[in-house]
Image (cartoon, rainbow, N blue to C red):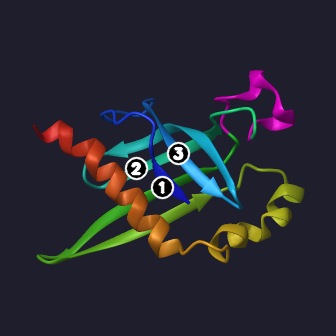
Amino acid sequence: MLRGTLVDQLITKVGDTFTMQMHRLGDDYLMINHVVEFEPGRRISWQPAPGDTSRAKGNEPANVGIPAGYSWGYTLTPEDGNTTVVTETFDFSALPEDLRRTLRDGGAWIHGSNSVLQSMNDSLELLERISVRQEH
């Protein structure tokens, strides 16, 4: 579950990074997110990477900051003057088959103890705070 950001910084382009403070299953940890798609006000996708050794492959410091091979994202599609459709995307097609099975084809997140809608809301609030600075 998203807890906040380590540093609020402006996202302006593909290649930028932002760090999220997370909490899951009694564990606090950091995720460094590498922006892979960005269209202001319309789309953002990122590849998460462990931000500390507790989440790094093999608990190795050398693996901190290396993307895990999947991406999360949101697309905002205006439907009418008062409605925007928000689509969350989780793409793990590049992961090995055995890991995709372990993640139950994304069901590990969808049916987890955290509400997907709450997670989406938290993420969108965070991204709005980061991108609002761009407008000023």
- The answer to whether residue 56 is magenta is yes
Quadrant of the rendering where the N terminus is positioned: bottom right
Quarter holding residue 102: bottom right
The quarter in which the C terminus is drawn is top left
In this rendering, would 43 be left or right of 31?
left
> 28 or 103, which lies in front?
28
Pointer 3: what residue?
21
Label 3 Cα crowd, 10 Å radius (few <14 / some 14-19 / many 20+): some
Q: Is residue 112 magenta?
A: no
As helix, strand or loop, the secondary structure at mark 3 comes to: strand
> For numbered disc 1, what is the local secondary structure?
strand
Q: Badge 1 local density, few (<14 within 10 Å), some, or many (20+)?
A: many
Q: Is residue 119 above or below residue 97?
A: below
Q: Tell me whether the residue at label 1 lies in contact with that at label 2, contact meaning CB atoms closer than 8 angstroms.
A: yes
Eye-nearest disc, 1 or 3: 3
> In 3D space, how far apart are the residues under numbered discs 1 and 3 (Cα atoms)?
17 Å
Query: Dot 2 corresponds to which residue?
Result: 44
Residue drawn at 27 percent across, 48 percent down = 129
Q: Which residue is mark 1?
A: 73
- Residue drawn 49% across and 66% down? 119
Residue 82 on image: x %, y %: 14, 78
- The residue range painted magenta reads 55-67
